[in-house]
Image: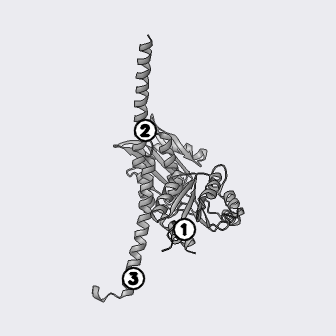
């Protein structure tokens, strides 16, 4: 059958499919855009952490997660939501070994594969890396009951959180470092003037 | 086209999460609606009285006053008794939905939501 022989109903069905796909893509792009804007909205750690929390809860669909950062070789919780002590302990004791073994930025597991005993306690683990170095990790331990699985759009969103979240946290720390140095210099200059 | 049919429909969005507010505001504004915002249930009541919205999107888990109580109070007021109210929440359990409908909501949407579908839901209620 040539293009000229395509029945109008087939063409309508094809266009309807394309329209549905376009709407899905629009929704995904809206999420990606809002996530990026919100993460970089203010040069304050609390703002970045709040943005990440809101994205994970309301755009991805998890109320059991933690954002951890590397401090002297250990993962320390920066911000978390709905975590049990066992999950915090997992991040501290098992998480580093799991992350060192990762070759991908985002690892997503099937809910049936999640098992605390086996050391695979997470549904998704996202490495936060900036300029090639590890900043930390975002770990999703459970999904909301009505959203048991993460799809490709969620994975893309989590990759944005990983990349932009790491950059934003580093920028905040750099800005705070400059601010501390500037305050120290000003304080020293004022001290000198008094003397 | 008459002046009344040219008026943009007004949507009040209430959520304590700025990310959700940004997403809803962006999509609804692009769809041609006037959007006002509230960050908790109490502010939602105040904004509803001032802005007289044509539809309200109401988060459930909010500080000061949750969405269920805000919905009940909106339904108790003559000026908002008939305004369509859509609850938007992470709570999907049947008991939560029952609470929402008992409070007087018209529709119950779970997060995470598809923003394009949310706009379609809003259009559907405003068309009817």
Question: How many residues crowd mark 1 within 10 Å: few (<14), some (14–19), many (20+)?
Answer: many
Q: CA distance from mark 2 to mark 1?
A: 38 Å
Image quarter where the N terminus of chain A lies is bottom left
Give me the C-alpha separation between circle 3 and circle 2: 51 Å
* A156 relative to B56 in the view: left or right: left
Using the image, tell me which numbered label, if any, was put on residue A12: 3
Disc on res. B79: none
Q: Residue under mark 1: which chain is it in?
A: B
Residue B35: tell me if it is visible. Answer: yes
Viewer-side label of 3, 1: 1
Q: Secondary structure at mark 2?
A: helix
Locate residue B124, reporting x and y percent.
54, 72
Q: Is residue B29 above or below residue B39?
A: below
In this orientation, which residue lies closer to the viewer: A64 or B116?
B116
In the picture of the structure, the residue carrying the numbered disc 2 is: A172
Q: Describe the element under mark 3 as helix, strand or loop.
A: helix
Q: Chain of mark 3?
A: A
Viewer-nearest residue: B71 or A114 = B71
């Amino acid at each position: 059958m040539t293009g000229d022989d395509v029945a109008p109903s087939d063409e309508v069905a094809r266009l309807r499919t394309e329209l549905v796909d376009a709407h899905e893509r629009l929704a995904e792009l809206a999420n990606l855009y809002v996530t990026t804007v919100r993460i970089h909205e203010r040069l304050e750690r609390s703002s970045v952490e709040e943005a990440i929390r809101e994205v994970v809860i309301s755009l991805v669909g998890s109320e059991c997660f933690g954002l951890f950062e590397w401090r002297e070789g250990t993962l320390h919780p920066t911000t978390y939501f709905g975590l049990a002590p066992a999950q915090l302990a997992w991040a501290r004791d098992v998480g580093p070994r799991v992350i060192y073994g990762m070759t991908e930025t985002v690892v997503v597991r099937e809910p049936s594969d999640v098992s605390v005993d086996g050391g695979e306690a997470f549904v998704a683990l996202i490495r936060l890396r900036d300029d090639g170095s590890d900043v930390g990790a975002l770990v999703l331990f459970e999904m909301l009951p009505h959203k048991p699985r993460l799809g490709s759009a969620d994975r893309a969103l989590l990759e944005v959180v990983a990349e932009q979240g790491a950059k934003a946290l580093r920028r905040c720390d750099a800005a705070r470092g400059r601010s501390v140095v500037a305050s120290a210099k000003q304080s020293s200059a004022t001290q000198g003037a008094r003397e | 086209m008459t002046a009344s049919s040219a008026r943009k429909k007004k949507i009040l969005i209430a959520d304590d999460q700025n990310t959700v507010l940004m997403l809803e505001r962006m999509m609804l504004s692009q769809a041609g609606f006037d959007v006002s915002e509230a960050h908790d249930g109490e502010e939602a009541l105040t904004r509803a009285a001032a802005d007289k919205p044509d539809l309200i999107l109401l988060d459930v888990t909010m500080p000061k006053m949750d969405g269920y109580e805000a919905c009940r109070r909106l339904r108790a007021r003559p000026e908002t008794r008939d305004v369509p109210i859509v609850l938007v929440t992470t709570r999907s359990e049947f008991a939560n939905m029952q609470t929402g409908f008992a409070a007087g909501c018209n529709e119950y949407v779970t997060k995470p939501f598809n923003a394009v579908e949310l706009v379609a839901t809003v259009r559907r209620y405003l068309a009817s």
